[in-house]
Image: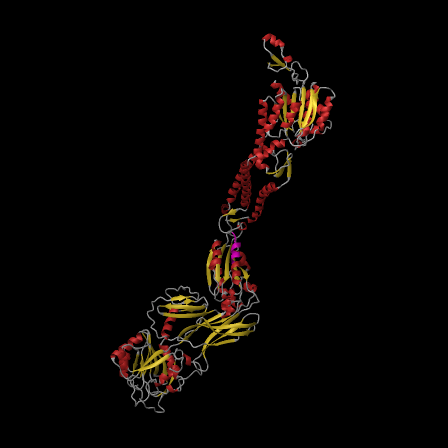
Amino acid sequence: MVHAHTGIPQPTRFIDPIVLTKISSLELVARTVVEGFISGLHRSPHLGFSVNFAEYRPYHQGDDIRKIDWKVFARLDRFFIKEYEGETNTSIQLILDCSHSMAYGSRGISKLEYGQFLAASLGYFGFKQRDGVGFVSFDEGVVEYVPPRGSIGHLNTVLHAIERSQAGQKTNLLKPLVDISERLRRRGIIILISDLLDEPERVINGLRRLACRGNDVTVFQVLDPTELDFDFSESAQFVDMETRAEMHVIPDYVRREYCRIIKDQVAYYERECQKDRIDFAMIKTTEPLDHALFTYLLRREQAY
Amino acid sequence: MNFVNPLFFLGAAAIAIPVLLHLIKRERARKIEFSTLMYLRKVSRKTIRYQKLRHLLLLLLRVLAFALIVLAFTRPFLGTRQSAASLGRATIAHIILLDNSMSMGYGDRWEEGKKAAAAIVRSAQLGDKVALLEFSDRTFVRTSLTGDFAEALAQIEHGVELGDRATRYGQALKIAEKISLDAGTGKRVVHLISDFQKNGVTGEDQNFRLGAGAEIERVDLGSDEFSNLALSNVQVVEAADGGGELKIKCSLVNFGTQDRDNVKVALLVNGRSVAEQRFRVLKGESPPVEFSLPGLTPGAHPVSLEVEDANHVRDNRLVASVEALGRTPVTTVENAVSRLEGRSSSYFLSRALNISVLSPYELTAITPQKLEAAGAIPGSLLIWNNVSGASATLQKRLEEFAKNGGGLAIALGNSARAADFNRMFASWLPVKMEESGTGTGGRRPADDYALMTNINTTHPIFRPFSDPHSGTFANARFYAYARLTVAAGAEVLARLDNGTPALVAADVGKGRVLVFASSADDACNDLPLKAVYAPFWQQILRYLSNYQEERRWVEVGETVAPRKLLEETALRQGKNVGTSDQAVALLDPAGNRVEMNPGSDAVAVDKAGFYQVRMSGLNAMIPVNPTPRESDLSHGNSEEMVAGWISRDPEAVSATSSDVRLDPEEQERMQQFWRFLLLGALLFLLTEAYLSAQMSPNRAEGIQGPGK
């Protein structure tokens, strides 16, 4: 394993994303990440991914009466709906942002590549759990849609779809997310991988549309370290990758304020997601994938 | 403020480094693709301005730090112009001799000389001393040895002045040496800034040697090629035809190394050009220039001759004063003449004294009775001509006249009686007339006469006759004469061959009295028939009027006596001189008042042109011309000249060059600023480092990933 910044081999248990870029097969990438990840989990047998627990809520008019828990009714003489009753498998919908801004990468790996690895790893991980896995890529609208299935051959379909995804047009999170939320028939786990570089209100609205259908939404905000630190040293004409708009910037003059703004932005997403029970994690493209998975799962375990 | 290592100022170029970096970082316009400009647009302009200011502050701190470091390395110190090289080396006394003689006015020599002097002062270093002297035939110390170089520079800029005097090196070098000795030990350098005019060296200068240990550094501003025209030897003469017309003559000299054509010479009278002539002057030649002076009204007139020569203008003009005289009244007192007697006693005198229009005298005859009735004696010259008797009143009046400065000539003809003479004059004159010696009346025995052979030719009266063929008294026969006894206080100027005094002079009070032992006409001698008669009496009257030949002009550097000159002028014009304690003002050609010593009437004239002398009601002018030899710009061999003035004693040279150094503590004290400068630079750098760290990208608050 090679450290991303220095090129000096580091005895770390995590896999460097840049090393993964050298592996041509996305499946192999996913397997490398997940197997390594799982082999590192043997001391934590309590971790699990399935949503196989029950939740009761009062019956409302219009609910499917088949979902009424009659045992509870017998005991309490009140109708309760049992949700996710005894399901062994759930569906995981991976949503990857393929807008042009995702093509940005300053450290040898673009956000899109990182997102692909992450999506592939999570998909592989889901298959390992015998969950159905689907994949959606979007830019201004939905580009590719692979519905979630749990069959063995479906993994390849998903991985191929992930591999095919390319940076496209401008970001417009709201429209594709609304679109996706309407396409999903079953509630399940939705994992959005995006840089969320759009109007914050639109982003949050889109996420809410996903979450309000009972989906368990997880958002990975993938950002390049340079986007966070703005560590440019020389003044330059900065070109917006999506709009091609130009702006002359002297980094020294704006760095401090920029960093504050983007930090506030991330904090805002985190806060708003928390309100809507959406899991949010910001990942830098320099962070090892399994490290991201590990920390994310750890948080989920703590949350449930 | 001066600097020990001024070369370190080259390091100031380092200040450009932060500025260049700042500009390069700012101005490079390469394009960078970035994911979104959304957040960059949210950065407020106020923030950008604030950051900009902080960066400018950083830039300023860096530039200041560099500047202070550079300044510290140059080792500044307070004091006059001093430099590092001087710290720890032998001190030098620089004595600058700046030639301000007229010849330095040629071309731009004077300005070059001043520049050279200033350069020498600027090159002087810490511990050195500088003295500034300007010299011509007179040496003037502008600044004595001083470490205050600014004062010397100020004197070079505003003090020194180009003059009209002649060059004389020897005297200047002597004074320079004397001043250099005041410097004590150490090296002594005399900087001689001059055109090294060949005739600036006199015989006395050639024998002069500078003392041991003194060096001469020469700044030679002269050149072998030059072109200069000058006028010299101006004279005002009466035309040979005796018609009274005056001519002004001079020589036009081409001192240069080239022939000159179409040279204009103009005559100016009373400031107006009245005539001009053109000349071709070959090199080394001096054709005569002659102008006729137009008729002048009585009085003194400023006359100048000007040659057109742009190369050296200061010697282009010669000035003179031409005085068209009015007549000085001379009164002859004589007895009334009866028709039978024929000619009056002043018959010959009137002809001798009124010989031409240029004669300064006008003779009028008066009887003693009329003189007495007139109340006062007119004019300042009186001839008591063969008067037989007079009242006591007149005697008293004559005595007062003489004692108050009047001139009295007494001619003792055949009417003169010893009793009368002694009554009138013996009481106040040291001369007595003997009874027995009275002349022989009107008789003229052919063989009984005396000759005036014993003449004091050194006396002013007889000086014009002292040269051979300039007139003789020896052929005049004196048939009758008075025998005079001369007491102390009187001087016998001429004696007859029998030893009898013929002409006796005596000073009485302010006046002069002459007693001539014979008659002024031909009654007692045949002198009136001789050629010397007229000049003799003119001389007598000149002597009595204390007359001095008016000088047409003086040379620069000569001493004049303004008060005396005014008195003479007044006397010539028949005016009353007045009391001598009145203030006399002397104005130079530029109209500036010349300071005169209170106790002395003598003052040296420095500038060419017309000086004005003024006292209440009286004016006189002094024409002053430059020294002719100063117009000759022939260039001497400066190397040889200087070699001749340097001491040839090598032992003495080495003996005096002991080093005078500043002690190390003094040196350190004078240049301790560098510590504070470095401290300042350090403070600036620390502040810069702090601010820079505050603004660095790494310090920008990053966003932690999930695992951090």
Of residues B182 and B384, the one drawn nearer to the viewer in this rendering: B384
Camera sees residue B520: yes
Residue farthest left in this picture: B392
Of residues B155 and B423, the one drawn nearer to the viewer in this rendering: B155
Give me the residue at 62% from left, 36% from top: A232
Q: Position of residue B550 (x, y in %)?
A: 41, 74
Question: Taking B154 as reference, is B428 above or below it?
Answer: below
Question: Which color scheme did the rendering employ for the protein?
Answer: secondary structure
Q: Position of residue A142 (x, y in %)?
A: 67, 27
Q: Is residue A223 magenta?
A: no
Q: Is residue B124 magenta?
A: yes
Magenta-colored span: B117-125
Question: Taking B145 as reference, is A131 above or below it?
Answer: above
Q: Position of residue A272 (x, y in %)?
A: 58, 24
Give me the residue at 64% from left, 40% from top: B30
Residue farthest front in this picture: A62
Q: Quadrant of the C terminus of chain B?
A: top right
Q: Please tell me whether the stretch drawn in magenta is mainly helix, strand or loop.
A: helix
In the image, B274: left or right of A244?
Answer: left
Question: Taking B14 as reference, is B299 above or below it?
Answer: below
In the image, B532: left or right of B195?
Answer: left
